[in-house]
């Protein structure tokens, strides 16, 4: 199964780097959400992407939008990485059941046990309005995310 534009975003609840639960549906009616799946913490391309979010946080976390990043790493890994890199946006753990949320969104590679690079923008009503997927070694163009956020009035 792969989530497409126009679909209702599948709800999930995962723990963030502070071990607090984050539920996608809690943002419904309040904020758009950029859901960013990434393969592994502490790796070059993933760190570059998350640092770009951190460095442009006003575009990705404000009164109109929240950004959450998801990998299959365990919460303690996210806690250490967030502390070292100054990531204040939620890093969610899809550790167990392993890759369940990534599978639901169609971005889990069960051959290697990792989430692929998938991005989904969910509007305030809970509908998916943007998707992109990139191979693991290829960084995403976050300008396309900003353009999609502008189109729905979240930037």
Image (cartoon, rainbow, N blue to C red):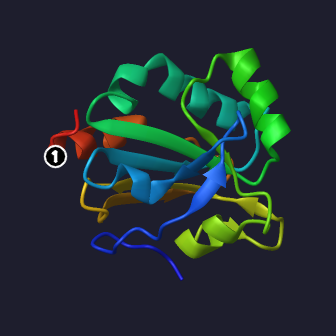
**Residue 142 appears at what percent x and percent y?**
41, 37
Q: Nearer the viewer, residue 7 or 18?
A: 18
The quadrant in which the C terminus is found is: top left
**Residue in the image at 71% along x and 57% along y:** 94
**Residue 71 appears at what percent x and percent y?**
69, 50
**Residue in the image at 15% along x and 41% along y:** 153
Quarter occupied by residue 143: top left
**Residue 45 appears at what percent x and percent y?**
67, 35
Q: Residue furthest bottom?
A: 1
The quadrant in which the N terminus is found is: bottom right
Q: In the rendered view, does 118 fall on the left or right side of 45?
A: left
Q: Nearer the viewer, residue 153 or 14?
A: 14
Which residue lies under the disc numbered 1? 151
Q: Determine if residue 67 is in view.
A: yes
**Residue 9 appears at what percent x and percent y?**
40, 68
In the picture shown, does residue 4 fall above or below 95?
A: below
Q: Secondary structure at mark 1?
A: helix
Q: Determine if residue 43 is in view.
A: no
**Residue in the image at 34% along x and 56% along y:** 122
Q: In the rendered view, does 125 fall on the left or right side of 19?
A: left
Q: Nearer the viewer, residue 87 or 137?
A: 87
| Label 1 crowd (10 A; few <14 / some 14-19 / many >=20) | few
Q: How many marks?
A: 1
**Residue in the image at 76% along x and 60% along y:** 114
């Amino acid at each position: 199964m792969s989530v497409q534009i126009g679909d209702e975003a599948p709800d999930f609840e995962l723990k963030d780097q502070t071990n607090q639960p984050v539920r996608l549906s809690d943002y419904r009616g309040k904020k758009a959400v950029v859901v960013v799946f990434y393969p592994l913490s502490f790796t070059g391309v993933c760190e570059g992407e998350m640092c770009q979010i951190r460095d442009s946080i006003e575009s990705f976390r404000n009164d109109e939008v929240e950004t959450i990043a998801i990998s299959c790493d365990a919460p303690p890994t996210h806690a250490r990485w967030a502390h070292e890199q100054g990531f204040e946006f939620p890093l969610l753990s899809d550790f167990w059941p392993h890759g369940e949320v990534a599978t639901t969104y169609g971005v889990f590679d069960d051959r290697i046990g990792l989430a692929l690079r998938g991005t989904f923008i969910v509007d305030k009503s809970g509908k998916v309005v943007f998707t992109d997927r990139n191979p693991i070694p290829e960084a995403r163009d976050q300008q396309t995310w900003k353009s999609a956020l502008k189109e729905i009035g979240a930037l």
